[in-house]
Image (cartoon, rainbow, N blue to C red):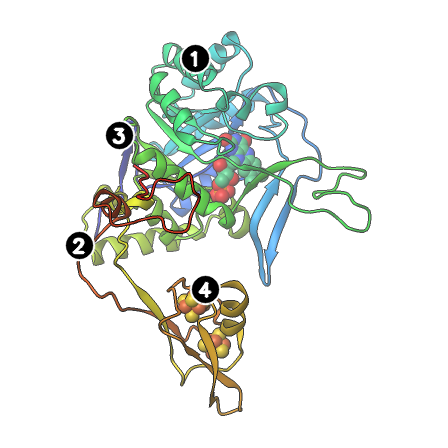
Amino acid sequence: MADLSIDFCSIQSPNPFWLASGPPTNTGDQIKRAFDRGWGGAVWKTLGNPVKNVNSRYAAMSKGRNKIIGLNNIELITDRGLSINLQEMGEVKKAYPENAVVASIMADSFAEWQELIARVEQTGADGIELNFSCPHGMCERGLGSAIGQEPAVAEKITRWARECSSLPIIVKLTPNVADINEQGMAAVAGDAHGVALINTIKSIIGVDLDDFIPYPKLRNGSTNGGYCGPAVKPIALHMVASLNRNPDFSLPVSGIGGITNWQDAAEFLALGCSTVQVCTAVMHHGFGIIDEMIKGLSVYLSEMNMESVAELRGRALPHYKDWAELDMNYKVVATIDEDKCIGCGKCYTACQDGAYQALALSRKTTKEGKPIPTVLGDRCTGCNLCSLVCPVECIAMVDVSESDEIESWNEIVARGKFVVKDGLSSTESTKSIA
Ligand SMILES: Cc1cc2nc3c(=O)[nH]c(=O)nc-3n(C[C@H](O)[C@H](O)[C@H](O)COP(=O)(O)O)c2cc1C
Ligand code: SF4
Ligand code: SF4
């Protein structure tokens, strides 16, 4: 059996699956139940001066029976007292010495950061996560993402935390920025031990068209919230990959955002994360999803002949390239399995109106007399759209490359093989993007 245990910034955990700071980590009782079920670690719901929350606070994007493909929340940090949180944190750590217990914290001044860190240290917690990333409510008070969005401030507070604490310091980054690398490099400059990302994405999930109040509704109004859940996974994957392929960035990364099953987690690990954190999926399905996560990852690692999680880390990074490094000689075209086609016409409409007019309605029909589309090979750009919309998955993209030679755009330009023929008159005839 593969070894699932991990070392993240010198914090040990029996597996890479941690609960992210949020409602599932609001109390010691919840975290104990999660550890009993198999979760490797937990980042406590952010501590600070307790706040007053609004009452209605979540809203979701649904798709058919999947009730939460994206979750929007306007919740603040913990609204429970600091002493009770810290007391429970100490109890959890004592009862579960093998599990990782990390305190997420947020404060307003050097004195507050200093006191909070000192009090957290007394609990025996394994590490501290600095919340520089909450994008609603707290940022309006100059905290959360207001700090993450100012790399110089983030660096300074990270350094304060390092000076005040002997524990590993993890900085939680906000996705509400143009380039995640600026925050990542601020964490490096502030001497953090690691980073965690992403926190939620600033969002308005929808508007009630009868009374024009956005969701979640609070009698006469609402506000922008933070978006998370399965819908944000692609954004989170890009951000962790962007950091992990940055040669100047060297910190361990805890990946967060839309993780629901072991495959999602494995993708974050393959893009260079050491651990993963989960919030929305637990809010939706409960702590029990860990059973499948642990089993699935163990079996996968064994099948891939990997002995540990560390062997999976970063395996996808060499394959994440700049566009200009992609193989321009690779060519695929759509092929339709006529026996499986139900003649719905979805692919034809999509290609006709939204792609490259490479499908024709032939005389061939299904048993029910509906036309089966035919691919016009020379017009097909291999864009994949038809295969994405086909409801019975009977369209395959087939490799018809004429050459095995891999040739990138950069190489084409370097060899002077691409000449701009009908472009802007001010453009040089050989185009270079180097
Ligand atoms: C209701 C709710 C409350 C949250 N509270 C916190 C918090 O107090 N501190 C924090 O760092 N992140 C908080 N988060 C963000 C999560 O930790 C996580 O970064 C985000 O939800 C993305 O992960 P997910 O897609 O698995 O939910 C919260 C998320 C939700 C949905
Ligand atoms: S791959 Fe794109 S261009 Fe080719 S048939 Fe499908 S939709 Fe049309
Ligand atoms: S979408 Fe699929 S099932 Fe529908 S017509 Fe096209 S190939 Fe056939």
Query: Disc 1 residue type?
Result: Lys
Q: Which residue sits at x=64%, y=27%?
A: 137
- Distance Cα–Cα, label 3 vs label 4: 35 Å
Q: Nearer the viewer, residue 341 or 414?
A: 414
Instruction: Measuring from the top left, give residue 304's x and y in whole percent.
Output: 21, 56
Check the image and report above or below for 355 versus 365: above
State which quadrant residue 127 falls in: top left
Position of 234 with respect to 307 (left or right) is right
**Spot occupied by residue 230 in the image (x, y as percentages of width and height):** 49, 50
Circle 4 sits on which residue?
385
Q: Closer to the observer: label 2 or label 4?
A: 4
Q: Which mark is residue 305?
A: 2
Q: Is mark 4 within 8 Å of ligand 2?
A: yes
Q: Where is the C terminus found, in terms of image quarters?
A: top left
Most extreme residue toward the top, as rendered?
A: 111
The residue that label 1 is drawn on is 156
Query: Which is nearer the N-term, disc 2 or disc 4?
Result: 2
Residue 144 visible to the viewer: no
Q: Is residue 388 above or below residue 135?
A: below
Q: Say which of marks 2 and 3 sits in front.
A: 3
Do the residues under discs 3 and 1 have CB atoms within 8 angstroms? Answer: no
Give the image location of residue 190, x and y in percent: 37, 16
Looking at the image, how many numbered discs can be counted on the residues? 4
Q: Amino acid at mark 3?
A: Pro
Residue type marked 2: Asn
Task: Find numbered disc 3 in the image and state the secondary structure of the residue it sits on.
Answer: loop
What's the mark number on residue 247?
Answer: 3
Distance from disc 2 to disc 3, alpha carbons, whole Å, reads: 28 Å
Q: Residue sitting at 27 percent across and 60 percent down?
A: 330
**Of circles 3 and 1, which is in front?**
3
